[in-house]
Amino acid sequence: MYTTNRTPSPFPTSSSADRAILLATVSSLDPPHFLAPVISAAASSTSAHLIIVLFSRHFNDPRPKSAVAFRGVSRVERFDDVCRLLTYVYVQATSVAQSLGKVLMDIDVLLLGLDADVPTSLGKDVDVVFRVSGDSIPVPLPPHITSARQSYLAATDHDSIDPPISGSPSSPVTTSIMPASLQRPSRLPVVALGGTFDHLHAGHKILLSMAAWITGEKIVVGVTDDVLLKKKSNPHLLQPLPFRMECVRAFLELFRPGIEYAIVPLHDVYGPTGWDPNIQGLVVSHETLSGAEAIANYRSENALSALQTFVIDVISPHSAYIDPEDMELMRSMKMSSTYIRQWIADKSVEDEENARVETEK
């Protein structure tokens, strides 16, 4: 999996790419600490948009069509593990961008298996491709990625991809071993979530990614209507509803192409979960658990089936997957639309003051 034919070739510190992509393989679902210096270097050298693509056999299709294919992990059963991994990467990249004043820098993290082609549209407009020195991506890459400028970065020591273990989620399987009626679904056909999604940031993208991760057919996203946001801070900086909905759609098409997206205005706490009998799952953050409880009560009162609820709470003090240093970094992160709007407001005042000073010289 790993070769030694590439030595580190860091992107020149004097250069900055508007758009970049970072490609790396991961051997487990643990937070990829070995990638921290690579993510930091890529985020430092990118000014507008950084796409981080993680490849792993764990992200393969959990229901392979071939009996000799490696089966990916269950999307439902490994929800927490994948969420921690995804959050770790987002936090590493976002913390660097924020420390350098690049609060509006767009960061996307994608999870790709080794059993499918890389989307041909991915990375078409990038200025540089960041790679991990010694890491060989075991799937064909589109020509526009291989022909773009490559910068190889050194990671910390890590092991190569683990060999398959008999009976492990990634071992070769025959789908006829267990009757379909007895198999737990790896994905839920229809999953819902809701939010404001103003100035789409890492926190939003983790929520959307994890909902898409467990969705088999359709994802329902309720986006809070403008009329419900009048009491938000800096309301004049809130992005209009159609724009926020389009940003949600664009991200989902990037993270999980090929499924159905139902992106609708949200006029109350329930949205489609208050009437749609086809929804099976609900993804919420720890801060919006009260909304999930309200939805559960409403569905019960209206003879609708209960939803399987998935809670994103990656900074739980009881987590065994996050070390104290990373925990503190996550808690200090400002992944909120409120923070972003205030940053924009403060910067506008600062720019106006600087312009006034210049005119008085």
Image (tube, rainbow, N blue to C red):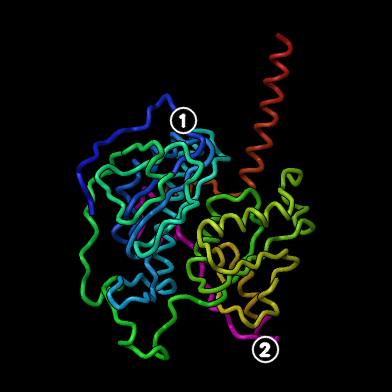
- The quadrant of the rendering that contains the N terminus is bottom left
* Residue in the image at 36% along x and 71% along y: 73
- The quadrant of the rendering that contains the C terminus is top right
Dot 2 falls on a residue whose secondary structure is loop
| Separation of marks 2 and 1 at Cα, in angstroms | 56 Å
Could you say which disc has been placed on residue 35 in the image? none
Q: Name the residue under label 1.
A: 16
Q: Nearer the viewer, mark 2 or mark 1?
A: 1
Magenta extent: 298-327
**Percent of width and height locating residue 53:** 41, 52
**Percent of width and height locating residue 271:** 70, 71
Toward which corner of the image does residue 220 lie, by quadrant?
bottom right
Q: Mark 2 points at which residue?
A: 303
Q: Which residue type does callout 2 highlight? A: Ala
Magenta stretch containing residue 313, yes or no? Answer: yes
Toward which corner of the image does residue 159 lie, by quadrant?
bottom left
Q: Is residue 105 left or right of residue 171?
A: right
Q: Which residue type does callout 1 highlight? A: Ser
Dot 1 falls on a residue whose secondary structure is loop
**Percent of width and height locating residue 7:** 24, 37
117, 54: nearer the viewer? 117
